[in-house]
Image (cartoon, rainbow, N blue to C red):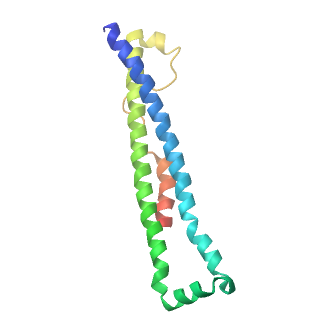
């Protein structure tokens, strides 16, 4: 292989690995955002539990109980959209990791498996990680269940 191609792969490796880590950071940020959004209903319930202080709001909700559904429905929709976005980010992160594994595999193949196995402990399989990660879905299923 030409040296130019190896240089290209090294630069690609750097860029893709940075993109992978920034995607994982974005997932963590969206989880925090959703927790902030999901905390609104309990805060509203705590506020409305004191009828003396909330006076008029409690009367309006007693006369129109369907008004209470509007913010809950909005939070449910936001939760489902955020869950979909986090799943999309997770799939992007898996794709980035597969690309990094492919670049690593190129250099392992070039160096020879015997030489590389002494230095490389990270995966070189282009089919890993899987797009279905149980770790992220065990976090998202309660979100969706909580939102609905």
- Which quarter of the image is occupied by the N terminus? top left
Locate residue 84, reporting x and y percent.
Answer: 40, 54
Q: Residue at x 51, y 60 (%)?
A: 142
Q: Residue at x 40, y 15 (%)?
A: 107
Q: Nearer the viewer, residue 130 or 145?
A: 145
Look at the image and tell me whether residue 130 can be seen: no
Q: Residue at x 62, y 70 (%)?
A: 43
Q: Is residue 9 above or below residue 130?
A: above
Q: Is residue 47 above or below residue 89?
A: below
Considering every residue shown, the one lying at the far bottom of the view is: 63
Q: Nearer the viewer, residue 108 or 7?
A: 7
Locate residue 12, reporting x and y percent.
Answer: 39, 23
Left-right relation of 50 to 110? right
Locate residue 137, reporting x and y percent.
Answer: 46, 52
Q: Residue at x 39, y 43 (%)?
A: 91
Q: Nearer the viewer, residue 41 or 129?
A: 41
Picture mark count: 0
């Amino acid at each position: 292989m030409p040296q130019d191609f190896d240089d290209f792969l090294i630069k690609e490796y750097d860029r893709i690995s940075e993109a992978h880590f920034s995607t994982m950071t974005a997932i963590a940020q969206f989880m925090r955002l959703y927790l902030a959004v999901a905390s609104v209903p309990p805060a509203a319930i705590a506020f409305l539990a004191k009828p003396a202080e909330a006076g008029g709001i409690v009367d309006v909700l007693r006369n129109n109980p369907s008004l209470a559904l509007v913010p809950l429905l909005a939070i449910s929709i936001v939760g489902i959209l955020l869950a979909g976005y986090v799943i999309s980010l997770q799939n992007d992160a898996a794709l980035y990791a597969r690309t990094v594994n492919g670049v690593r595999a190129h250099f392992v193949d070039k160096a020879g498996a015997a030489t590389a196995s002494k230095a490389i402990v990270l995966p070189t399989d282009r089919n890993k990680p899987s797009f279905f990660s149980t770790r992220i879905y065990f976090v998202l299923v309660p979100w969706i269940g909580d939102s609905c």
